[in-house]
Amino acid sequence: MKYTVQVKPGSKNEGVELLEGGSLVVRTHARAHDGEANTAVIKLLAKHFKTAKSNLKIVAGEKSRRKVVDVL
């Protein structure tokens, strides 16, 4: 299943929030530098969906705050 994810890097609090319409907001402490935020997003989403990190893949928006993530 594919989800639209809005990433908020450098946030004070970490977490995943479900918005109306099925999109997600992911807040992470990690900065958007050298893929650190992408790694943190995958980790937080894996915890949220209770699945392995290998079951998630960023399909679009790897260098953007708005991403499309595929959850297997």
Image (spheres, rainbow, N blue to C red):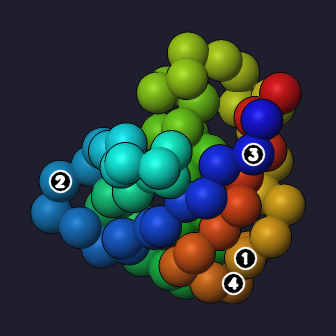
Counting residues from the start of the chain, the first of labels 4 and 2 encountered is 2
Q: Earlier in the sequence, mark 4 or mark 3?
A: 3
The span from disc 1 to disc 4 (Cα, nearest Å) is 5 Å
Disc number at residue 63? Answer: 4
**What residue does disc 3 label?**
2
The amino acid pointed to by label 2 is Asn
Report whether 18 appears left or right of 52. left
Distance between mark 4 and mark 2 Cα atoms: 22 Å
Disc nearer the start of the sequence (3/1): 3
The residue identified by callout 2 is: 13
- Residue drawn at x 37%, y 48% is 20
Left or right: 28 with respect to 66?
A: left
* Pair 3/1: label in front: 3
Image x and y of residue 5, in percent: 55, 59
Helix, strand or loop status at disc 2: loop
Q: 22 and 56: which one is in front?
A: 22
Position of 61 relative to 3 (above/below): below
| Residue 55 percent coordinates (x, y) | 80, 29
